[in-house]
Image (cartoon, rainbow, N blue to C red):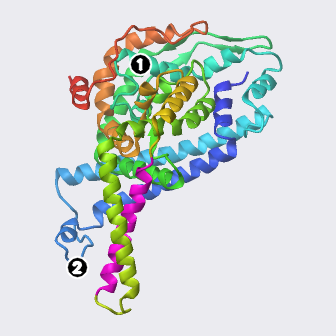
């Protein structure tokens, strides 16, 4: 008997080696961020910094009484969570090496997933049923979003919020038997008592750590997005939202195949999305401004060469030339556009590869600034979401999960009318009411 879901986890991450490398990197970054945020809170006198005084080192605690207690409590609880995270990472790495050794099959991507399954089963196994079992968590999360009448493209859906939901639902399977001829999967069910207890515990932890953890998570997300943006080239200034996998994914489509399919279509979606923002008047005005700036830059550059090395205008001209050149570089990156025929071709490619209209798919491709904002909002609303939205409807979630059969062509149809055109204010107002 082998846990195919855990085997696929090692396969998806490229093998136990890369799981260990990723865990080490994440732990070291997390430890640095906790120390860094603590130093910003306790070692810097921000009043002196704001007043532009020479001494910026803090000589006394930033506040007293209840405020100081809250800060210390946040740091203490977050540090405990960090220690738990490090221990959890060590156990994950150990588990990954054990799985890779026991499988005795290459899990680094050199062998296809279908071949891995067949070698584990030592016979013919329906791949569709294997994928059904592996993709259960994705389907279950999609069911929860449907029950709560929150569309995956909604502003309130973030990776942090999805993580909170997935880690509070205690879902267990009654049995799985791997045979040479077939994979028999029994119904999964939700333990309501355990789920209620988990929701209350996690809500308490999120509320206790919220001020300090928001700073930590904000820096983590910002640094991560900055790194991704700097390492990518071309049009990729957008990122897929957390809800994309719960709407654009095909039934029982494995994660690595879904990411590959999204990657192939992303440049088309982004180009079409940018083309919708352009207008002939704005394009004309932008072209005129860009032409004028180019003339000024050339003039300043020529004047800086002609001027004497120690001349009074040399340094200001150099600074202006650099600043205007940077503006032109940014403008040249944003001025690329495609014609109407190319837009139609790209829309057709999107329709074929995703199976939905381009206008619908574009809602799941967010600007990176919006993506960061979504993640930060997710940290704020997660405890309230769990207590007031998820907890009262656990009975309905249990029923929906038990209807999730291998024979079903889609996830349970809950017949919900989900409106994608709600603005942010309406969504948040509806959420808190």
Q: Is residue 373 above or below residue 137?
A: below
Q: Residue at x 32, y 34 (%)?
A: 204
Q: Earlier in the sequence, mark 2 or mark 1?
A: 2
Image-based side of 29 in relation to 299, left or right? right
As drawn, is 248 to the left or to the right of 47? right
Graded by Cα atoms within 10 Å as few (under 14), some (14 to 19) or many (20 or more), the crowding at tag 1 reads many
Q: Position of residue 142 (x, y in %)?
A: 46, 20
In this view of the protein, which residue sits in the foreground, 211 or 250? 250
Q: Is residue 417 magenta?
A: no
Q: Is residue 321 magenta?
A: yes
Residue 129 vs residue 318, the one in the foreground = 318
Disc marking residue 100:
none
Where does the magenta region start and end?
Answer: 313-336
Which residue is situated farthest in the right direction here?
Answer: 122
| Residue 25 image offset from top left, x and y in percent | 56, 53
Name the residue at 45% across, 10% down: 400
Q: Quadrant of the C terminus?
A: top left
Q: Provide the residue designation for mark 2.
A: 54
Where, by quadrant of the figure, is residue 253 drawn? top right
Residue beneath disc 1: 144
Q: Position of residue 71 (x, y in %)?
A: 27, 52
Per the picture, the main secondary structure of the magenta-coloured stretch is helix
Residue at horizontal 50%, vertical 50%? 228
């Amino acid at each position: 008997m082998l846990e195919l879901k855990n085997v696929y986890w090692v396969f998806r991450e490229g093998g136990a080696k890369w799981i260990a490398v990723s865990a080490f990197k994440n732990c070291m970054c997390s430890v640095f961020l906790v120390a860094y945020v603590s130093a910003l809170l306790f070692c810097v006198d921000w009043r002196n910094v704001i007043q532009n005084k020479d001494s910026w080192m803090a000589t006394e605690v930033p506040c007293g009484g209840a405020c100081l207690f809250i800060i210390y409590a946040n740091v203490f609880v977050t540090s405990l969570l960090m220690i738990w995270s490090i221990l959890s990472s060590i156990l994950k790495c150990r588990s990954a090496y054990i799985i890779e050794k026991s499988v005795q099959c290459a899990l680094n991507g050199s062998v296809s997933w279908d071949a891995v399954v067949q070698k584990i089963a030592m016979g013919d196994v329906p791949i569709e049923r294997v994928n059904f079992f592996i993709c259960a968590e994705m389907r279950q999360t999609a069911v929860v979003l449907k029950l709560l009448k929150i569309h995956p493209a909604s502003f309130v859906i973030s990776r942090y919020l999805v993580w909170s939901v997935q880690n509070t639902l205690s879902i267990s399977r009654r049995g799985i038997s791997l045979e040479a001829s077939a994979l028999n999967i029994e119904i999964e069910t939700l333990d309501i008592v355990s789920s209620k207890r988990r929701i209350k515990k996690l809500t308490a932890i999120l509320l206790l750590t919220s001020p300090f953890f928001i700073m930590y998570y904000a820096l983590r997300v910002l640094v991560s997005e900055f790194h991704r943006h700097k390492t990518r080239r071309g049009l990729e200034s957008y990122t897929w939202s957390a809800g994309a996998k719960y709407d654009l994914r095909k039934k029982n489509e494995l994660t690595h195949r879904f990411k590959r399919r999204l990657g192939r279509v992303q440049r088309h979606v982004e180009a079409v999305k940018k083309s919708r923002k352009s207008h002939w008047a704005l394009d004309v005005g932008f072209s005129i401004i860009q032409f004028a700036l180019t003339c000024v830059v050339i003039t300043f550059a020529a004047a800086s060469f002609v001027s004497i090395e120690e001349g009074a205008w040399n340094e200001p001209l150099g600074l202006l030339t650099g600043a205007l050149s940077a503006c032109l570089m940014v403008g040249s990156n944003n001025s690329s556009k495609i014609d109407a025929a190319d837009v139609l071709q790209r829309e057709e490619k999107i329709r074929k590869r995703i199976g939905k209209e381009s206008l619908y798919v574009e809602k799941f491709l967010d600007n990176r600034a919006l993506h960061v904002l979504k993640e930060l909002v997710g940290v704020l609303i997660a405890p309230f979401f769990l207590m007031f939205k998820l907890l009262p409807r656990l009975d309905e979630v249990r029923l929906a999960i038990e209807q999730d059969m291998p024979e079903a062509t889609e996830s349970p149809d809950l017949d919900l009318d989900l409106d994608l055109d709600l603005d942010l204010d309406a969504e948040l107002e509806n959420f808190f009411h």
